[in-house]
Amino acid sequence: MARKSAVISPVKRKSRKIVAPTDYSIQFDDYLIHCEERNLTQGSIEGYRFYLGYLKKYLEENEHSLLVDEITERDIKDFLNFMRKTKNNTQATINSAIASIRPFFNYLIEQEIIQDHPMAKIKKGKIDQKPIIPFSNEDIKNLLKQPDKSRHAGYRDYCMMLMLLSTGMRISECLNLTISDIDFKNNRILIRESKNRTPRIVGMAKKIKPELQRFIRLCLPNAKPFDILFQNQDGGKLADNTIQENFREYGVQANIDPRIRVSPHTYRHTYAINYLKNGGSTASLREQLGHRTIETVEKYLYWSTDDKLEEFEKYNPLDKMELQGGVC
C-alpha cells in the first residue's frame, strides 16, 4: 500500500505595514505635492507653503518636536499666541494661519500618519468688522497725478489704476490680463484666471479705451496678442508685492488720509461703492466683481447710502419740533 506523502503547508507570514516617516519637512513637501496633484490654485498652495513654513520655523526656534505625530494642541496654541502677542499679527492673519495649517493635519489623519488631530478643538477667532473707507473723488484725482507717465513703469501703474477703477477687478486678475483679453470694440474684458476659477466677462469704462490703446502702442510696440498687458521691466509678469509697494508710495505722495489703506483692493472697494451709488444693482455688481454670493456684495451698501442719510436729515421729525431748553 502506497504511503501518502506529507502535505507541507506554506508558512503564513504577517504582512508588515509600511510606516511613513513622521519628519515634518518630509510630510510638508509631500503635502504640497498632494495639493498640486489636486490642482489647487497657486494662491492656495502658496498660502499653505507660507503658514506651514511659519509653523515649522517656530517649532525649530522654540525646540519643539518636529515629528508630526508628536505635535500637540498645546504646540499649535503656543504658536498662535506667538503670532498674536510677539508678532502682533491681526486676528484675520491668525485665522488665515489656522485655515492653512488645519488641512495639513487633516491630510496626515487621512493618510494614517498621525492618530490624534492637534487642531480638532481649535477654532478661528471673531473679527471686528471695520467699515471699508473708499477713496473720495479728490483722492482719486490726486492719486492719478502721482505716477510718472513719461516712464514705462509710471505709465503702466497709471493705466492699472484706471483699469481697477473702471472694472473693480482683483489685482491678481489684473496682473494676469493679456492684450488679447481686451475687447476694445465692445468695451469688454475677459478675465480668464479668477479667484474662484470661473472665467467672466466684465465691462470697462469707455474713457479708459484710448488710454489703454496708447499705452500698448507706446510701451508695448512689439507685443503679441497673448503677451501680458502690464509687464515688469523685463517683459514678464509683475509681482503683486511690487504693485502693492508702488501704490502705497503713491498714497504717501498724494497725502491720502492715513485711515485709508492705499492698496489695489481699495480701488476695488471704491469701484463697488460708486457702482451702487450710481444706481447699479447688487446682483449685477456681484457678477462684475466675481463674487459667488450676494451677501459678500452687501457690505458695500454701508457706504452707498449717502442719499438716504441726506433724506433722513431733511425729514427727521425731531428737527421739525420746537424744543425748550432745560434749566439747571
Image (spheres, grey):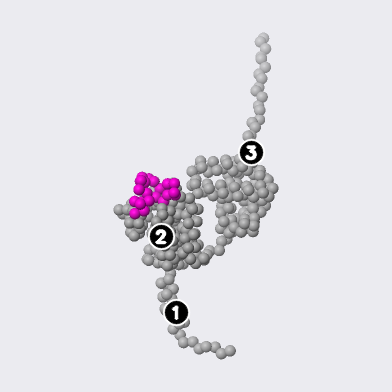
**Res 32 quadrant in image:** top right
Picture residue at 64% right of the left edge, 34% below the top: 17
Tell me: residue 109, above or below residue 283.
above
Q: Which residue is mark 3?
A: 21
Q: Is residue 304 magenta?
A: no
| Disc 3 packing (10 Å; few <14; some 14–19; many ≥20) | few
Residue 327 position, x and y percent, is 56, 90
Q: Residues within 10 Å of mark 2 (few under 14, many from 20)?
A: many
Q: What residue is shown at x 31% (from left), y 54% (from top)? A: 186
Residue in view at x 43 percent, y 76 percent:
312
Q: Amino acid at mark 1?
A: Asn
First in residue order: circle 2 vs circle 1: 2
Residue 200 appearing in the image: yes
Looking at the image, tell me whether mark 1 or mark 3 is earlier in sequence order.
Answer: 3
* Residue 288 relative to residue 72: left or right: left
Crowding at dot 1, Cα within 10 Å, few <14 / some 14-19 / many 20+, comes out as few
Nearest the eye: 290 or 243: 243
| Contact (Cβ within 8 Å) of mark 1 with mark 3 | no
Q: CA distance from mark 2 to mark 1?
A: 35 Å
Query: For the magenta stretch, what is the residue range?
Result: 214-235
Image coordinates of residue 325 in percent, x first then y, are 52, 88
| Residue 138 on image: x %, y % | 42, 67
Q: Residue at x 60, y 50 (%)?
A: 54
Amino acid on which disc 2 is placed = Leu
Residue 314, x across and y down, in percent: 42, 78
Q: Is residue 260 left or right of residue 220?
A: right
Q: CA distance from mark 2 to mark 3?
A: 51 Å
Q: Which residue matches tag 2?
A: 165
Tag 1 residue: 316
